[in-house]
Amino acid sequence: MLNFFQLILIYAGIYAIMAIGQNCITGYTGMLSLCHAGFFCIGSYATAIMCKTFGLSFWLSLPVAAIATGLIGLLIGIPTLRLKGDYLCIATLGLGEIIRNIATNLNPVGYNSIPRASLFGYQFASRNKVAFIILIWAFVLIFYVLFQQLAHSRLGRAMIAVREDEVAAQSNGINVTKYKISSFVLGAAVGGIAGCLQTAYTLTVQPGSYTFMVSVMVLCTVVLGGMGNAKAVILGAFIIQLISYLPQLTGLTNVIPAQAKQIIYGLLLVVMMLCRPQGILGRDRFRYGDPRTRREKLHDFFIRPAGKAREARHENP
Amino acid sequence: MRILETEHLTREFGGVIAVNDVDFHVEKGLVTGLIGPNGAGKTTLFNQITGMDRPTSGRIVFDGVDITGLPAWKISRMGIARTFQNIRLYKDLTVVENVMMGLHFKVGSDPFRHRFSQAIRSYVFASRENREVYAKAMDWLSFFEIDEHAQDFAGSLPYGKQRELEIARALAADPKLLFLDEPAAGMNPAETAHLMTVVDKIRKLGVTVVLIEHDMKLVMNICDSITVLNFGMKIAEGTPNEIKHDKGVIEAYLGREEEED
Ligand SMILES: Nc1ncnc2c1ncn2[C@@H]1O[C@H](COP(=O)(O)OP(=O)(O)O)[C@@H](O)[C@H]1O
Ligand SMILES: [Mg+2]
């Protein structure tokens, strides 16, 4: 049981990192992309090849994985990011599958017994889950802080403008294409790092584990937690992983088939769309110079639906 | 001095010639009115000039520079701002955030145009930069007397205020030339009267204004010069007085309105 909880913590961390990347693309810039499995795959493969074939250490293959994934994100992004909404979704979905197929053809059996990562002489062995939990959640924390800062910076604001209204953004001197591509490349690179971390944990890479389902799960994570909200997507990652390990956690592996989780994800998304389309925590609103106290904010958040709060305040000052 | 000139500007949509061989020009510091019946091609002309759409043929010269076919964001940075006929605010952002977007290229460095170190600084010290951008945005809001709405969502403002916010966002970028596409459309008389004072304030800032408007009283009162379009062609230009007495204009535009009355 404890074992499964530790496993959930590890995978929730990996998915949280991926979701932070997806959130940059979908939550901030508003592009519906469905190829995070592809980025995950590139990151994993790059790490496997660097560690095994070139004998690089884990810490050196990490930036290589990030840069490789970012570059491929750039290659994919330049032609596809002209598309919008559903079209972009379909195009990226196709590209994600292409990446997986290329990986399969490259090495159908994948890579095994990849050298372990080590830090200050300490070897990260898959047995010792606690060490991995610390490692992976340290990365989650780093990316959370980095992307939170991004969202509050000029770059992030421009991405949000692109999400809200591309034409208006152009009229404000915002180069829409540039911000779309930068957001896509950043999101991809983070996905690559998630792949790198997963490889360090499993020490094997198999093309079968980067299916379209992974992309769907990552997107689910973001939608479930709340688009454009870094805290929310971390929460989303936990929920998605809890569902994923539900059969093992409840000890009903024989009763609940593994495919059941796909049904649960589907149901969950439908329920979310009906009851709380903005996600559990909703969108992060950066109210610059918001005069409300923390208590008022909490009150507005829980008692009054977002958006109505201010109107109500003005009606009865 | 002419701040803007178009030469033989033409835009075809399939068979429709929305803008037909138009030589439109704007004098620096004045308020120029652009009038004409619905479908005359006024918005299309605005879109060509602001880079939102490409002309089929012709040339646009702004401040001595040929800007034909440049992307919209570059044209905005050169000093042409605009508002839209159907208000385009960032509805889910607050009022002050909308104006902060308008300040995008005015404050802070651009990670991809300046030195890398500067980009890093802009990212690392974002909160300091934000305070500066926020303060400037608030200044603009008080200029337009909508600062008490700063923390409201833009979409929740009354219609007239949304129009003013859109103008505030456009002006925040410190443009030389401001295009207003039917700013008074859908406003009640009180809001329209207030809009006239707003346009007057903008003129006093030294910004050249081009205004598409249907409200004849507003146009005649506020504009120094008027250009009339009909079926994509320029049929007249001159002072409000000249336009009032132009036969072609009365036939095409004013005459028809009187019949409707
Ligand atoms: N994107 C477009 N595609 C096709 N036709 C268009 C487009 N934009 C405008 N038009 C046509 O161009 C003409 C001028 O439209 P517009 O510039 O909006 O007129 P106005 O702003 O003066 O009312 C109309 O006949 C309109 O149908
Ligand atoms: Mg129009």
Image (cartoon, coloured by chain):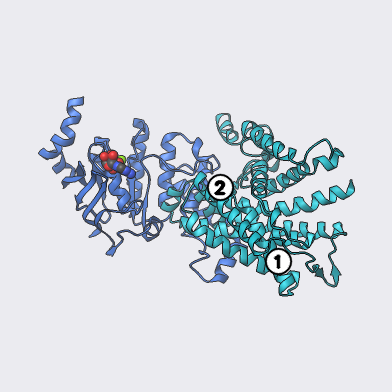
Chain in cyan colour: A
**Quadrant where the image shows the C terminus of chain A:** top right
Q: Chain of mark 1?
A: A
Q: Camera-side residue: B77 or A101?
A: A101
Q: Quadrant of ligand 2?
A: top left
The amino acid on which the numbered mark 2 sits, given as a three-letter code, is Leu
- Reading the image, the residue beneath label 1 is A47
Residue B224 visible in the snapshot: no
Chain letter for the part of the structure drawn in blue = B
The residue most toward the top is: B261
Chain of the residue displaying label 2: A
Secondary structure under the numbered disc 2 in the rendered image: loop
Report how many numbered discs are placed on residues in the image. 2
Q: Which residue is mark 2?
A: A32
Residue at position x 66%, y 51% in the image:
A211
Crowdedness near tag 1: few (<14), some (14–19) or many (≥20) residues, C-alpha within 10 Å: many
